[in-house]
Amino acid sequence: MNSKKYIPVNDIKFLVWIKKLLAYVALHLERWYITAPLDELNELAAIYEHALDKTQSANRGSVDVHDKNVARQRLEKTTRMYVQGFLTRNPYVTNSDRKEMGLPVYDTTPTPVSKPTVRAMGKIVYKGAGSLELHITPEADISDNKRAYYGCKIVYDVIDANIPPPQSEKGLGQAVFTRRKKEPFIFHPQDAAKRVYFCIRYENGKGEAGPWSHVFSAVIP
């Protein structure tokens, strides 16, 4: 059931639904720890029922129809506010309760999150003196499984020219985790003209990791 379209469109079905809802809520206020009274809703429901009855008469006029529409709008608005405020996310209201009231039923079973399998790629953009920006993109399309690609772990290090370059992520001593697609890096002035090496991988929200990228590097401006 659509969470915004649970209220019946038909006027008579709407009246039947609202009466059932109010009666059910009244019976379970204590169990749901709801203190908000139903007086206003009951009053608006009675006004709507009276206005609806007048439109069922053979002598109804345009004023009767207008009054019914206004009464319905007021009742519908107040009902939505009550449902949203006291029932929708109330942990004591079960899905069985929601079915009885004709309200949307929410899936409480956690959706499994798979481990990322696509490799992350990095493109280095020069931003100014001592400043680089790492642009992170997937090696393949991940649009059908975005939850597996919660963020990206970046390991990096500034390495002197006289030291052999690292061949894998194990040779890089600094790390940062980001959910941004463009991660900025600011380096010390004394590191200018040195080379910084990066290796990156995607991780899901549980920390399960995908494959590492190849090591790539850039000269610090």
Image: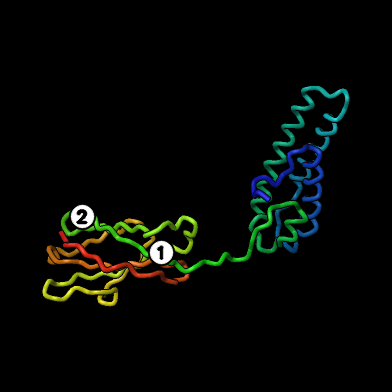
Asked if residue 176 lies left or right of residue 42, the reply is left
* Above or below, 18 relative to 190: above
Callout 1 secondary element? loop
Q: Amino acid at mark 1?
A: Val
Between 213 and 56, the one nearer to me in the picture: 213
**Residue pointed to by mark 1:** 118
* Above or below, 62 relative to 101: above
Quarter holding residue 169: bottom left
Residue 119 % position (x, y): 37, 65
Residue at the image point whose x is 36% and y is 67% from the top: 201
Numbered badge on residue 126: 2
Residue 117 % position (x, y): 43, 67
Residue at the image point whose x is 75% and y is 62% from the top: 30
Residue at the image point whose x is 38% and y is 70% from the top: 211
Disc 1 to disc 2: CB gap under 8 Å: no
Residue 66 % position (x, y): 74, 27
Quarter in which the C terminus is drawn: bottom left
Q: Residue furthest front?
A: 140
Between 146 and 14, the one nearer to me in the picture: 146
Between 27 and 191, the one nearer to me in the picture: 191
